[in-house]
Image (cartoon, coloured by chain):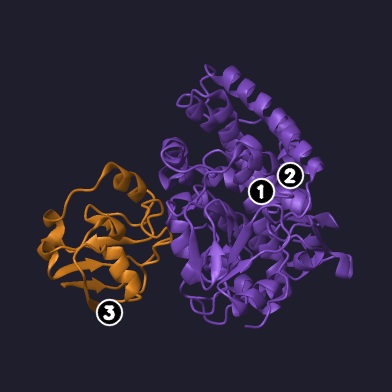
Chain colours: A purple, B orange
Amino acid sequence: MTEIREFDPVSPYFEKNAFKELRRMQDSCRVYRHKGTLMPVVSFFKARDIKPGLQDWQRFSSQRSEEYNKKALGDAAILIGNDPPLHTKYRDVVAPLFLPGAVHPLGPVIDRMTDKALDRCLDAGEVNFVTEFACTVSLGVIAHICDVPEEDHDLMFRMTQQMATTDGMPVFWKEPHPEVEARIAESMQVLGEYFLDHVKTRANNGRDNILNHIASQVDDQRHLAGLCALVLAAGFETTMNLMTHGLYELLHHPEQMHMLRQNPNMINAAVEEMLRFRGTIRKQDRIAAVDMEIDDVEINKGDSVAFWTACVSRDPDLIDRPDEFDIARKVPRHGAFGSGIHMCIGKVLARLEVRAAMKRLIEKTSLIEEMRGDESYQSVGNGVLDGALRYSVQLKS
Amino acid sequence: MVEITFVCADEEKVTVQGAEGDSLMELALENMVPGILAECGGACVCATCHVIIAPEWSDRLSPRSAQEEAILEGALSVTERSRLACQISLSEDLQGLTVHVPEEQL
């Protein structure tokens, strides 16, 4: 068997060539054992392994250790970093708050935030689309339903970004990163204190907000702080990046942008294609709960397992012309929201928000163009979580 | 084997057979029935395997669980005969069952 060239998802090369690298690995093997990592870790690349794996929480556990949480998300790993029964307990608290019946009435809020973002960006010369448009909408909406006032948005942005910029990377680290652990500890400390105070002061104010719904059902204060931070961070980080990368792909595929401008009602299909092509979360972590051997690769109980959901979205066994961005696809199939019991709770809100905001963006502009030439886009430097730091564009009415 | 007919949104009928104990969702996925996405794979958390049971069969299925009720709130075009295919287990009692696939799942 030919030796597979090293696959290193925390390398600068991967960050610049993620889909090329994932394609190489998808074509090379089913499972790959990473070399030189602090934690033993294997990666899976094929939809036929990943989907069943994500659905089998008894073999592929989500139960993270305290030690691991220090490196990734801290206490905000509650729920996503747990197995049943704790996972079920908290999922039953949070999931009803994001079912369509709860989320669809938010349409006017999304429109209001989108108009606010457009006011900032339209005919304003060069703007950073990430912060001025995408964040204004996505953070604005989740902050609204959490009753976080506008003066605190900047704090929310900074603290959650501090946790998210390295998310997904620690399993592949080859050396310790105490500076990351310190940043995550600081973020969690600040957010934890903020949210515990937040729910306490709002307990009797008569205004409805989802964090107080959660607080009324969760006694453990550490878990409560973690759930609040998770809802806030997951509620905007992923949609903010999806809008940014969705626009990026439309601008880099002008024929697709033209098609959408001619038919704005294609927005639902277009957003599914953005999720497929540039879903923010490219990989989900699990832990092997039993020893197993797959294609001569031994996986031991306790090994970290990386399921590359971005590969599900581009698996040629599942998707015709997987590396083409085509908003006219008829059958939406992708791994952007994961699968199984940990499937994204916020997917209804995410779809509603991105569809509404991007449709309005298209309808209210006659032209969107990149600025600064080849320097228009800058990522956060994490190829595992597809995060944008800056996207310099101008929007013309 | 249990024979099931899926009537797709374009009225095309897909008649397939599955083993007792399998779920209706698994049967749909195995046979690539158009319109059944089943994103969560049967964890009853996504409502993308929504089907509408033919009227003559509607009172012959086990009732919805509280979890299924809650998740169905998330489906589009829900009717009194709506079910999640992942929550229906094939049995001899369901021989000849017909279900309709809605136009949209998302």
Chain hosting mark 1: A
User: Disc 1 to disc 3, how far (Cα)?
Assistant: 41 Å
Looking at the picture, which amino acid does disc 3 mark? Glu
Residue drawn 59% across the image and 33% down it: A226
Which is more toward the observer, B10 or B28? B28
State the residue in front, A325 or B91: B91
Q: Which of marks 1 and 3 is in front?
A: 1
Residue A228: percent from left, percent from top: 58, 33
Give the image location of residue A162, x and y in percent.
Answer: 75, 42
- Labelled pair 2, 1 in contact (Cβ < 8 Å): yes
- Residue A95 appears left or right of A19: left
Residue linked to disc 2: A161
**Residue in the image at 61% along x and 45% along y:** A234
Secondary structure type for disc 2? helix
Residue A285 appears in which quarter of the rendering? bottom right
Q: Mark 3 lies on which chain?
A: B
Residue under disc 2 on the same chain as residue under disc 3: no
Residue labelled with disc 3: B12
Q: In the rendered view, would you say A58 is above or below A383?
A: above
Q: Where is residue A369 in the image (x, y as percent from the top left)?
A: 79, 67
Residue nearer the viewer, A172 or A153: A172
Q: What residue is shown with label 1?
A: A237
Residue A300: where, in percent of width, then height? 54, 57
Q: Can residue B28 be seen in the rendering of this structure? A: yes
Mark 3 neighbour class, 10 Å CA radius: few under 14, some 14 to 19, many 20 or more: few
Q: Which amino acid does label 1 sit on?
A: Glu
Res A323 visible:
no
Quadrant occupied by the N terminus of chain A: bottom right
